[in-house]
Amino acid sequence: MPKGKIYCFRASYELSTKFDPSRVPDWLCLEADWQGYKIYTLPWVADVARVLGALEIEDTPAEWISHLESLGLTEVCQVIGDDLFEGKGYA
């Protein structure tokens, strides 16, 4: 089975008007703060979804950004995980 990476992204909360947070797929984790949406991938779910054909993207930042934009997120950019998890004790 492929072994994916955890990728971290931010997206604009105000500009993502076509995005429905209640429809986030299981291979993504979504949070929001004063800077906008914080999104990170869950490779242990994404890898299985890829094998089953439910997720048809390559495991690259560019493909993930395209996937996030297809969900309605706007101004998606990759960020360093340390920045995303700051204050949580994960990094």
Image (cartoon, helix red, strand yellow):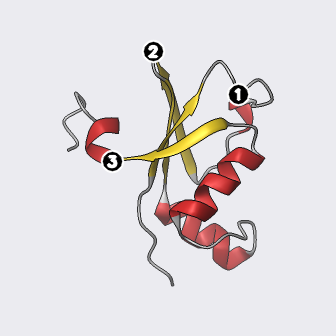
**What amino acid type should be assigned to the residue bearing mark 2?**
Trp
Position in image of residue 45 (x %, y %): 55, 61
Label 2: state its secondary structure: loop
Q: Residue furthest right?
A: 18
Which residue is at 71% across, 66% downward?
55
For residue 80, which numbered disc appears in the image?
A: 3
Q: Is residue 6 above or below residue 56?
A: above
Position in image of residue 83 (x %, y %): 29, 37
Q: Residue furthest bottom?
A: 1
**What amino acid type should be assigned to the residue bearing mark 1?**
Ser
Marked residue nearer the N-terminal end (2 or 3): 2
Label 3: state its secondary structure: loop
Disc 2 packing (10 Å; few <14; some 14–19; many ≥20): few
- Whether residues under marks 2 and 1 lie with C-beta atoms below 8 angstroms apart, the answer is no
Which image quarter: residue 30? Answer: top right
- Whether residues under marks 1 and 3 lie with C-beta atoms below 8 angstroms apart, the answer is no
Q: Is residue 72 above or below residue 47?
A: above
Which residue is label 1 attached to? 16
Which residue is label 2 attached to? 34
| 32 relative to 63 in the view: left or right | left
Which residue is at 62% across, 64% downward?
63
Rounded to the nearest angstrom, the CA distance separating label 2 from label 1 is 14 Å
Marked residue nearer the N-terminal end (2 or 1): 1
**What amino acid type should be assigned to the residue bearing mark 3?**
Ile
Marked residue nearer the N-terminal end (1 or 3): 1
Which image quarter: residue 51? Answer: bottom right
Disc 3 packing (10 Å; few <14; some 14–19; many ≥20): few
Disc 1 packing (10 Å; few <14; some 14–19; many ≥20): some
Label 1: state its secondary structure: loop
Position in image of residue 42 (x %, y %): 49, 55
Q: Is residue 18 above or below residue 82?
A: above
